[in-house]
Image (tube, grey):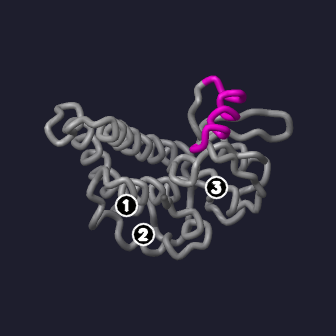
Amino acid sequence: MKLFGTTTSPYVRRVRIAALEADVPFDLVDTATPDGQAALRLVSPIWKVPVIEVDGRILFDSRTICDWIVTTHGWGGLAAPGDRWHAANLLNAIDGALDSAIQVFYRRRDGHDVAAMPFAQRQRARIDAIFDWLDGEHRAGRFGDGAALGLAEMSLACTLDWMDFRDTYQTAGLFTELRAELATRPSVAATMPHA
């Protein structure tokens, strides 16, 4: 499997973790380089990572790719969801928080004063609301019991670690025990974002 992406992308990290957990070998094409960007644009019309090339097929989007991994190679060390629809809601919420943080990150990187920007304030409020809901699901035992790494737990870890790495949202105190337990997992530890 050829994986197009970067070592800093939380979406690419999800795929890397899923591949490691299912023992699926992959070669990373680093899209942070000009050559990597050119290669990405040859295979994907949306120019976003992750993208995989496998068995003569091109797949984009981390959720599609993770679905391909577990469908073709099994869940490996990942826990299959007990309630597929609830797990989808958890993933949608996590993706919503991450998308908001990414929007603020790019505006800050482009030189905008995001602290005073109403758009950024709305994005932070959206992240707050999502994490409040996820915390309620966690406290009710419907998410992140710590016993298993499922797609939602993996996505949450990738999101929170990226928020810390890019300093886009204060994550201190969020899912502390779950994060500590997941951080010891080899696939999670090996894929931590770094410059």
Disc 2 vs disc 1: Cβ atoms closer than 8 Å? yes
Q: Main secondary structure of the magenta part?
A: helix
Q: Is residue 38 above or below residue 54?
A: above
Q: Which residues are magenta?
A: 32-45
Instruction: State the separation of the CA atoms marked 2 and 1.
Output: 10 Å
Residue at image mark 1: 138
Tally the numbered discs: 3
Mark nearer the viewer, 2 or 1: 2
Q: What residue is rendered at 24% in x and 43% in y?
A: 124
- In the picture, the disc for residue 16 is 3
Amino acid type of the residue tagged 1 in the rendering: His
Q: Nearer the viewer, residue 89 or 154?
A: 154
Instruction: State the separation of the CA atoms marked 1 and 3.
Output: 25 Å
Q: Secondary structure at mark 3?
A: helix
Classify mark 3: residues with Cα within 10 Å, few (<14), some (14-19) or many (20+): many
Classify mark 1: residues with Cα within 10 Å, few (<14), some (14-19) or many (20+): some
Q: Residue 94's x, y, as percent?
A: 42, 47
